[in-house]
DNA sequence: ACCTTAAATGTTATATTATAACATAACATT
DNA sequence: AATGTTATGTTATAATATAACATTTAAGGT
């Protein structure tokens, strides 16, 4: 029994036909800059570059793949370089870690802190992010029947996205 | 709008006061033996021992902690020893991997194949497992609005269990 | 019992992911 | 400029997982 219509947003959709990833990336970087400015935290050149690399595609990116690219640009790069930047970006919500892939994706809406639910296509590898309050509420309710208080939930769903479903008829 | 009462089971509860873990463990091993027999797969001595070690407590166990114990008993143990046994046990549903902890827990109900939802207490480290069809149905519905077809979902919830909540008043 | 084959385990090496610890550099504030 | 703080550089190592191939064990047919 729902009291009101809960919000359910798609924070990061699967990319549609004609998706301009350049725009997508630029907009993400601009949002990140604005958000960091507003919060008084520093999106340094390195952090910005790591964010850019994470946003290179809509597929989760591995930490060591980022590191390889950083090394091409600056020989002083080492694992801590990338993990520190990722830690910062995750703390600020610019990036989420996909635990089941040990990989990282950019967040489509970092300005409002949240932890979404991720849909991962096993065919194309793309990831979409939802932020669905109904799901959260139902889980909270279920947890409550066990006397459990939720701090944080990780929801990672694997399957086939619409595009890959139609291809594999 | 629910058509029927969906089943919602607690496959593995948080341990209650007076919980006899010896019974809990014995029963898990017996169930595992029966289930393997029924399926025509082999619960070898090694696999049984690994299952026993995973079931050592209700807290997720690390692969290399299992390996350390195996090494005490048999010097020929190496990473593949434990990972192969875990792979078998996971495939048969006797053990689940908690992705967000890279650790493994025993399953309370391996005879029916499933992937549950895990509640992880950040204070005592214990894990409970639910298998809630309502949650699954809601997620399927939400995914469907994006044209996404779910194969498998990972739900790991962190928070405080009832016992730890009352302690931390 | 003997042979054959498949499954499980042993063994060595290496890949992948992540953190510790300490030094230096950049930045902000006074 | 002096100071404290934050970020980055640097070296080393910890923690998690798999590849590849050899050997042993178990199952099934003759
Ligand atoms: Zn894009
Ligand atoms: Zn997000
Ligand atoms: Zn128990
Ligand atoms: Zn289970």
Image (tube, coloured by chain):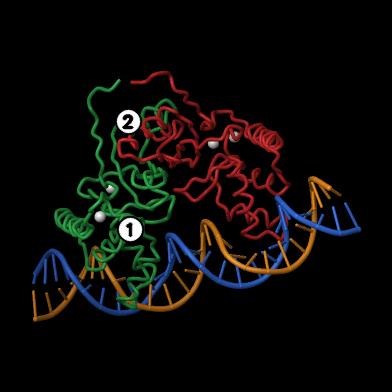
Chain colours: A red, B green, C orange, D blue
**Front in this rendered view, residue A36 or B93:** A36
Give the residue drawn at x 66%, y 43%.
A52
Say if disc 1 is inside 8 Å of ligand 4.
no
Quick one: D30 or B26, which is closer to the camera? B26
Question: In this figure, which residue is indicated by the disc labeled 1?
Answer: B87
Give percent across and percent down for residue B9: 24, 39
Q: At x 41% / y 36%, what residue is drawn?
A: A160
Q: Quadrant of the N terminus of chain B?
A: top left
Q: Quadrant of residue B62?
A: bottom left
Q: Position of residue A128 (x, y in %)?
A: 50, 35
The mark that comes first in sequence, 1 or 2, is 1
In the image, is residue B59 above or below residue B131? below
- Between the residue at mark 1 and the residue at mark 2, the CA separation in whole angstroms equals 28 Å
Count of numbered badges drawn on the protein: 2
Image-quarter location of ligand 1: top right
In depth, the one of A162 and A8 nearer the eye is A8
Label 1 Cα crowd, 10 Å radius (few <14 / some 14-19 / many 20+): some
Which chain's residue wears label 1? B
């Amino acid at each position: 029994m729902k009291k009101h219509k809960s919000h359910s947003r798609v924070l990061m959709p699967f990319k549609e036909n004609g998706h301009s990833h350049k725009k997508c990336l630029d907009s993400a970087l601009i949002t990140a800059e604005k958000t960091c400015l507003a919060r008084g935290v520093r999106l340094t050149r390195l952090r910005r570059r790591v964010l850019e690399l994470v946003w290179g595609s809509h597929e989760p990116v591995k930490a060591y793949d980022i590191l390889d690219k950083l090394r091409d640009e600056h020989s002083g790069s080492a694992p801590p370089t990338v993990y520190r930047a990722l830690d910062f970006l995750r703390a600020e919500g610019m990036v989420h870690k996909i635990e089941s892939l040990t990989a990282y994706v950019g967040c489509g809406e970092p300005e409002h802190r949240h932890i979404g639910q991720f849909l991962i296509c096993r065919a194309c590898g793309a990831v979409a992010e939802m932020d669905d309050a109904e799901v959260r509420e139902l889980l909270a309710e279920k947890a409550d029947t066990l006397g459990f208080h939720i701090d944080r939930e990780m929801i990672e769903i694997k399957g086939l996205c619409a595009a890959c479903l139609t291809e594999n008829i």
